[in-house]
Amino acid sequence: MIVTRVTTLTRMDGPEAAKANEALFKLSEISKRVGGLGARGMLATYRPLRDSERRLAEALNIQGICGPELVQAKETLKRWAGSRVRP
């Protein structure tokens, strides 16, 4: 099952700065509720993620496709969807 959600992740100081973290936590929660503990999530965004956001994504078992990596999105999605769930 693939669930898609669109949101804007802005990179600004202030309250908007936490949008990427918020999206990662929400994606993690949705993945667990819909697919159980073995589910995986993927965040695709046109802007690069900060190192702290990448670490959080990894800790939450979420793969990120960011910025220039979007050019390879088709191949990345095929590999990701066909790969086994990480233990």
Image (cartoon, helix red, strand yellow):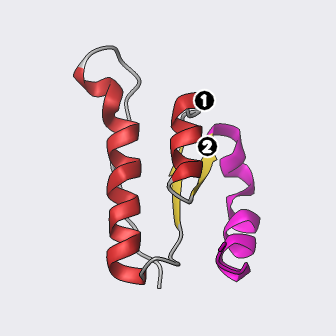
Q: Residues within 10 Å of mark 2 (few under 14, many from 20)?
A: some
Task: Give me the residue at 71% from left, 46% from top.
Answer: 69
- Element marked by disc 2: strand
x, y percent for residue 28: 40, 61
Which of the two labelled residues, at mark 1 and mark 2, occupies the earlier sequence position? Answer: 1
In the rendered image, the vertical position of residue 11 relative to residue 8, given as above or below = above
- Element marked by disc 1: helix
Magenta residues, dominant SS class: helix
Mark in the foreground, 1 or 2: 1
Quadrant in the rendering for residue 46: top right
Labels in figure, total: 2
Please report the bounds of the magenta region as a residue range: 67-87
x, y percent for residue 58: 59, 50
Residue topped by disc 2: 66
In the rendered image, the vertical position of residue 47 relative to residue 87, given as above or below = above
Quadrant in the rendering for residue 51: top right
Residue 46 seen from this side: no
View extreme (left): residue = 15
Task: Give me the residue at 66% from left, 69% from top.
Answer: 77
Quick check: 86 left or right of 22? right
Q: Label 2 amino acid?
A: Cys
Residue 75 seen from this side: yes
View extreme (front): residue = 87
Magenta stretch contains residue 52: no
Q: Which mark is residue 51?
A: 1
Magenta stretch contains residue 69: yes
Question: How many angstroms separate mark 1 from mark 2 (CA)?
Answer: 12 Å
